[in-house]
Image (cartoon, rainbow, N blue to C red):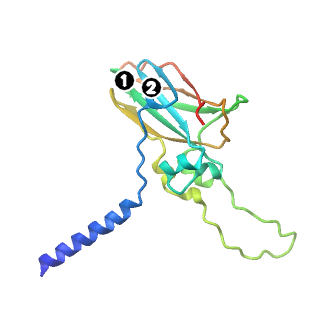
């Protein structure tokens, strides 16, 4: 009897886990060298792609389309084909638009709070309580997909998203600096990656 209960419990747990897992978005980008928007310096390639349309967004964020809500997610893939580990702790990244404005990324933890509550104008009349709309940017997938790597071992690659409060137009680019060889501490030359693919 105990054996049957144990088997039933394990079977139920497996089905429940599968039910949770099947809704999980699986996202695996290609190597950095496979992206149209890329640059290689000292054996380290950085590929980038702006996720500014619903079709692309679905592959990484499921039903959430951050760009529709004022957030431009940019995927960054770093591929280290050098013989040195590369430290990323001091990496700085900026989105530069066509006018030359440099925009810093919004930390993933702050993304859900960039949109203040909509406060309708009641013209001095008493407000009528309205149901609050759920903020779609509260989705945990924003944080799960954020770039978090601190190092890239030789022969390995890392990836993640940076989030910018900016419209995306052809002619923009990413400016990335602060990558260093772990052993020598020498900084790699800065990257300027034109974002030409749309």
- Residue 62 image offset from top left, x and y in percent: 50, 55
Mark 2 closeness class: few <14, some 14–19, many ≥20 residues within 10 Å: many
Label total for image: 2
In this rendering, would 117 be left or right of 178? right
Secondary element at image label 1: loop
Q: Is residue 77 above or below residue 27?
A: above
Asked whether the viewer can see residue 99, the reply is yes
Q: Residue at x 76, y 76 (%)?
A: 128
* Mark nearer the N terminus (2 vs 1): 2
Residue visible at 67% across and 36% down in the picture: 169
Q: Give above or below for 163 relative to 191.
A: below
Quadrant of the rendered image containing residue 131: bottom right
Lateral position of residue 165 relative to residue 120, left or right:
left
Residue 82 drawn above or below residue 107? above
Q: Quadrant of residue 64?
A: bottom right
Q: Check disc 2 and report the residue beneath it.
A: 45
Q: Are marks 2 and 1 in contact (CB under 8 Å)?
A: yes
Q: Nearer the viewer, residue 143 or 31?
A: 31
- Quadrant of the image containing the N terminus: bottom left
On the rendered structure, is 149 left or right of 193?
A: left
Query: How many angstroms separate mark 2 from mark 1 (CA)?
Result: 8 Å
Q: Residue at x 27, y 72 (%)?
A: 12
Mark 1 Cα shell of 10 Å, populated few (<14), some (14-19), many (≥20):
some
177 or 33, nearer to the observer: 33
Q: Secondary structure at mark 2?
A: strand
The residue where tag 1 is placed is 81
Residue 198 x, y percent position in the rendering: 60, 37
Mark yes or no: residue 88 visible. no
Residue 146: x %, y % from top left: 49, 45
Asked if 110 appears above or below 192 in the picture, the reply is: below
Residue 161 lies left or right of residue 17; in this view the side is right
Report the residue at 43% width, 40% height from top.
29
């Amino acid at each position: 009897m105990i054996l049957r209960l144990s088997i039933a419990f394990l079977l139920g747990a497996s089905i429940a886990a599968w039910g949770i897992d099947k809704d999980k978005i699986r996202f695996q980008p290609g190597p950095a060298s496979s992206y149209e928007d890329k640059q290689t310096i000292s054996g380290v390639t950085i590929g980038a792609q702006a996720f500014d349309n619903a079709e692309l967004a679905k592959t990484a964020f499921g039903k959430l389309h951050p760009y529709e809500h004022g957030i431009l997610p940019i995927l960054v893939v770093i591929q280290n084909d050098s013989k040195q580990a590369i430290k990323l702790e001091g990496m700085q990244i900026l989105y530069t638009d066509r006018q030359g404005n440099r925009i810093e990324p919004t930390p993933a933890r702050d993304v859900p709070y960039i949109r203040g509550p909509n406060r309708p104008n009641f013209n001095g009349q008493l407000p009528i309580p309205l149901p609050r709309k759920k903020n779609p940017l509260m989705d945990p997938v924003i944080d799960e997909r954020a770039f978090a790597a601190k190092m890239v071992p030789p022969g390995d690659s890392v990836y993640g998203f940076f989030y910018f409060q900016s419209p995306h137009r052809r002619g923009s680019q990413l400016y990335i600096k602060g990558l260093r060889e772990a052993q020598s501490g020498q900084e790699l030359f800065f990257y300027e990656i034109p974002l030409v693919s749309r």
